[in-house]
Image (spheres, coloured by chain):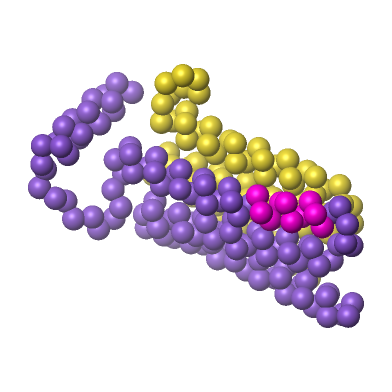
Amino acid sequence: MIVAITISILISMALIIIRAINGPTIYDRILAGNVFGSTTLALIAILSIIVDDAMYIDVALVYALINFVTTIAFLKYFKYRSLGKK
Amino acid sequence: MEIFLNILSWACLFSGAFFIFTSAVGILRMPDFFTRLHPAGMTDSLGLPLILIGLLFQSDFGLISLKILILIIFAVTTSATSCHALAKAALVSDIKPEGTIEKKPTKKTASKKATAKKSEGAK
């Protein structure tokens, strides 16, 4: 049962990667990156069931924080062409 | 009780995987950037929390379940924030939704378009 869930998440990651490669605008690519991070989060959560180790929840927590900050930083960079003062 | 919790947990896990898969198909197949935002928000606000709730039913009550709850709250709030930021940034940088009816250019919009073209040229 856990194998079916893992495989479906991996297939959806492949589909999102396709969108990230041939997205027409830069915002499509940023969106695909954001969603890819979320699916990775789900995969890490599933991994904590497979390995039966609760440590992976901490990894997922840090990954969620970094994913959010990355999305906002990419948006700011591509809008203003710098991360510091405008 | 144990069997009941197990069934509930697996139902949550399977429906979460289903929603993640459908939203990936939607991101690939939707025609426009603004329509693609909808399945993207679905992954973060429906698929991921369902998988984490399924995890919550399997874990023992304690610090781990608190961490999972924090993760659920964080996922829901940040997905809404990042989707709004993406839509706003795309609108500001002159990406029109598909099927928009062009209005006749008034003075304000004309000057706006001119400045947008200038900034594009500067890139």
Give coordinates of residue B21: x percent, y percent: 59, 63
* Chain identity for the colour purple used in the image: B
Is residue B24 placed above or below A72 in the rendered structure? below
Q: Quarter of the image holding residue A7?
A: bottom right
User: Magenta part of the protein: which range?
Assistant: B65-74
Quadrant, the C terminus of chain A:
top left
Reply above or below: B44 against B81: below
Determine if residue A43 is in view. no
Query: Does the magenta run of residues contain B73?
Result: yes
Residue A38 falls left or right of residue A43: left
In the rendered image, residue A1, in percent from the top left (x then y), is placed at: 78, 70
Residue B87, image x, y percentages: 41, 47
Q: Is residue B115 magenta?
A: no
Residue ID at (84%, 54%)? B64
Name the residue furthest top: A85
Q: What is the drawing colour of chain A?
A: yellow
Q: Nearer the viewer, residue B78 or B40?
A: B78
- Say left or right for B113 vs B60: left
Q: Quadrant of residue B43?
A: bottom right
Q: In terms of depth relative to the viewer, which is nearer, B29 or B50?
A: B50
Q: Give the x, y percent position of residue B93.
A: 33, 37
Name which residue lies at 55% across and 43% down.
Answer: A33
* Residue appearing at x 10%, y 37% in the figure: B107
